[in-house]
Amino acid sequence: MTIRLLALCAALFTFAAGAQTPTWKPTRPIEIVDPAAPGGSVDLMCRALKKFIDDNKLVDVPVTVVYKTGANGAIALDYVNQHQGSGETLFAIAHTFLTIGLTGESKLDWRDLTLLGILFKEFHVTGVRADSPLKSGKDLIEQMRKDPASISYGFFGNRGNHLHLAAAIPLKAAGVDIRKMTTVPYRSGPEAISAVLGGHLDVALVSAVNTAAHVQAGKMRVLTQTTPQRGPGYLKDVPTWKELGVNVDYATAQGFTGPKNMRPEAVAFWENVLARMAKDPEWQKILDRSLWASAYMTSAEMRRYYESEFEKLGSVLEELGLTKK
């Protein structure tokens, strides 16, 4: 009898405690702020989140993807900063926002946001035209060691961004003077690939999925990939940097944040949404098609990861002479 009475008391206490726990759901229209142009990986992630929310009826308010492109993400960052405390404003974030403050492109960066979670990691490849004199990753390393300026590297975005660093970090580890690299920014990865195919650019540093069709058509050759192990599909035939004797792998992680001062209840709500989406079969199909690696992280895990990446990328930017004091 005593045991049953204690169990009943415990159950009543749990119920009372649960009843007092505050719950939160969006009560105003939700904006998913996209800092990139339609069609890229960030945009695909934003639209996938909107579809997941709508299909599963997770909220009772409209969900819209809002494009705030330009200035390498600074315009979007400023826009989100105007909505401090809002639980209905989400911001799609990539590695760009780890470096945007360091390079002086914005007075704000990831530290001015509320971290909600990472969904996936994207890896990058070094692609050349099929008839390029660079036949292998070893050819690339040897040539860059001899004359770092002799090979033009193209990538999406501004110098100092995550794609520039995806080229610079492994080359630095390979003994290349990365300060002398010839870098050519483009408006998109496909534009950099077009420049390679047209003979105007030696190398395109792009997301792995961007070169797949060109490799299969025999128009491009991929020399290296930044993955820890060889990836799927055509990447099975491409050596990693580690296989080339360079002990580096590199990924850019993408996920979502909110404005500064987002309430803990709202953080918990969105953290739960992202955790559910990470297990969704439709999202898994997108990951596979895009050659992305599932890498769900909670808000706390994301913070630890970003702090580590921020320190690492900052030191490389400083060597490149791209940090603004």
Image (cartoon, rainbow, N blue to C red):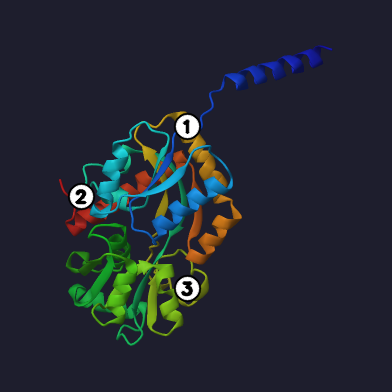
Query: Residue 126 location in percent, x, y?
Result: 35, 72
- Number of the front mark, 1 or 3: 1
| Amino acid type for the residue under numbered disc 2 | Glu
Q: Residue furthest right?
A: 1
Query: In this image, 256 relative to 202: left or right?
Result: right
Q: Name the element at disc 3.
A: helix
Query: In this image, 27 relative to 67: left or right?
Result: right
Q: Determine crowd level at label 1: few under 14, some 14-19, many 20+ residues with C-alpha closer than 10 A.
A: few
Q: Determine crowd level at label 2: few under 14, some 14-19, many 20+ residues with C-alpha closer than 10 A.
A: some
In front of the other: 104 or 256: 256
Tag 1 residue: 27
Q: CA distance from mark 1 to mark 2?
A: 34 Å
Q: CA distance from mark 3 to mark 2?
A: 34 Å
> On residue 306, which mark appears?
none
- Residue sitting at x 75%, y 14%: 6
First in residue order: circle 1 vs circle 2: 1
- Number of the front mark, 1 or 2: 1
* Location of the N terminus (image quadrant): top right
| Amino acid type for the residue under numbered disc 1 | Thr
Tag 2 residue: 105
In front of the other: 150 or 85: 85
Q: Quadrant of residue 139?
A: bottom left
Q: Name the element at disc 1.
A: loop
Query: Residue 319 location in percent, x, y?
Result: 20, 57
Tag 3 residue: 235
In the displayed structure, would residue 24 be above or below residue 124?
above
First in residue order: circle 1 vs circle 3: 1
- Residue sitting at x 54%, y 27%: 23
In the displayed structure, would residue 46 be above or below residue 226?
above
